[in-house]
Amino acid sequence: MPSRLHRWWLMLLLAGTCGGLSGCSHRAQDAHTLTFWAMGNEGEAVAQLIPGFEHAHPDIHVTLQQLPWKEAHQKLLTAYAGDTTPDIAQLGNTWIAELAALHALQPLQPYVAHSRVVRPDDYFTGIWATNRIDGVLYGVPWYVDTRLLFYRRDLLKAAGFDAPPHSWAEWSRQMAALKTRDTPGHYPILLPTNEFEQLLSLALQQDYGPHPGDGLLRDGGHYGNFESAGFKRALTFYVGMFHRHEAPLLANTEVPNPWTEFGRGVYAFYLSGPWNIDEFRRRLPAAQQGDWSTAPLPGPDGPGAGIASGSSLVIFGRSRHQAQAWQLIEYLSQPTVQRKFYELLGDMPPRRSSWQDGALRSDPEVQAFRDQLERVRPTPAVPEWERIVTEMQLVAARAAHGELTVDQAAAEIDRRADAILAKRRWMLDHQRSQQR
C-alpha cells in the first residue's frame, strides 16, 4: 500500500479529484494477461497493433482499456490510491514526474540495458530526456509531438522572400513586409492568446545560464525563473507581434476555422503541430496545395529549439507482469511497428530509424518535423508544470493586451509559479528533515 507520505502528496496534488473507477480494468488474475491503459485516438489505433504482438507472444494476452484524455489523469491517480493500477500505460510525458514522485512507476533502465530493441541513442535526445526524472528512466517514448511553422509559400514570395525564416531577425523582417501588403483584417501570423505552446517554444530557445540546470524554473525546480533575461527576451518578442498588430488578439475559440482562413490568406504563418498536415491537405482545394508548407522554428540566432512533447509507455511498480509488459513496450518500439502506428494515426515516431522508410522519409512537410525534433527540449520535470504553464499564458495574454509590461508580467508569472511550488518546497524540506 502507498506510504503515508505518498498518500499525503497525492492529496496535495489533486485533493478531492479521486472518484470511482467504474469501467476501468481490474488487476488480471491470469498470470499471462496484461492490462494496458491507452488514451484517446491512440487507444483505438493500438488496438489494431495488439494482435500482432499476441501472435508473436502466444502466451500473453493484452486487455486494452481505452480512456478519454479528459478523464485519464484522474483515473490514473485514483488507480494508484486504490491499488488498481494497470500493468502498462500510455502517459503524457508531462505526467511522468507526478507519478514518479508518488513512486508509482517502475524504473526501466535495467530493462533498457539488456534490450536489443530499445536503443537510447536512436531516440531524439530531447524526447528521451522527458522520461528521466532525477536521473532515473521511467518511460520509453511512444510518439512525439512538437510545434513549428506552417506558412504560405506564395505570400512570402509575393513579399520578396524565397524561403521561410531561420532566425528571429529574418522572421521579423518577413512579418513587417507582410504587414505592409496586408489588407484590413489580415495578419502575418496567428498566435491564439490562450495557447501556451507558442510562447513556451520561444522560451525554450533561450540560454538560461550561468547556473547549470536552471531554465524556466530555478534552484532544482523550487522557484520560477521567469524574471530571467532569457524568458523576458522571449516574452518581449512574443508580445511585440501583438503590439505591432502582426497577430490578432484572439483566442482559439474565436478562430473557428483557421484552415480556411489560412487558405484565404488571412494569416501567412501559423504555429501548430503535425496533425494539421492532414487537415490542410484535406481542407484546402487542390489548386492551393502547392501554396503552403512547413518549416522548423526560427530561433534567436538561427534554427531554434521546440517543445519536446508526446506520450510514453510506462510500467507500474505494482504490476505482477513486468517482464511481459516490457515485451509489449519492445514490440511497440520496433521501427516497423512505429511506422504502422504512424500510418494508422499520424503520430510521429520517437526513433530516428523509424523515419528511414515510407512517407516519413519522403514527405517534405513531414520532414520539417524530423528536423525540428533534433532540437526539441523538455519542460521542467515537476508535477506542477501544467499548472505553471497555464498561469504563464494567462499572464502573457494580459501583456499582449497591453495591461502589463514585460517586466511586470515576468514578475507576476514568477509570483504565481512560486505559490504553486510552495507545497513542493514544503514536502522536500519535510523529507530532508526526516532523513536527518
Image (tube, helix red, strand yellow):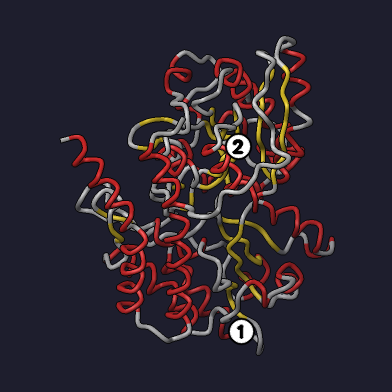
Residue 346 at what x, y percent from top left? 71, 44
Residue 242 at what x, y percent from top left? 49, 80
Residue denoted by label 2:
90
Residue type at mark 2: give it: Gln
Q: Is residue 369 above or below residue 283?
A: above
Residue 175 at what x, y percent from top left? 53, 75
Dot 2 alpha-carbon crowd within 10 angstroms: few under 14, some 14 to 19, many 20 or more:
many
**Horizontal placement of 15 versus 22: left or right?**
left
Q: Spot the residue most to the left.
A: 436
Q: Is residue 283 above or below residue 372?
A: below
Q: Residue at x 60, y 33 (%)?
A: 89
**Horizontal placement of 274 versus 307: left or right?**
right
Q: Residue at x 45, y 27 (%)?
A: 121
Q: Residue at x 41, y 72 (%)?
A: 237
Q: How many marks?
A: 2
State which mark lies toward you, 1 or 2.
Answer: 2
Q: Is residue 352 above or below residue 257?
A: above
Q: Spot the residue most to the right.
A: 286
**Horizontal placement of 53 versus 243: left or right?**
right
Residue type at mark 1: give it: Arg
Residue denoted by label 1:
181
Q: Residue at x 29, y 61 (%)?
A: 225
* Residue 327 occupies quadrant: top right
Depth check: 329 or 78 in front?
Answer: 78
Does residue 370 appear in the picture of this structure? no
The mark found on residue 169 in the picture is: none
Depth check: 273 or 291 in front?
Answer: 273
Q: CA distance from mark 1 to mark 2?
A: 47 Å
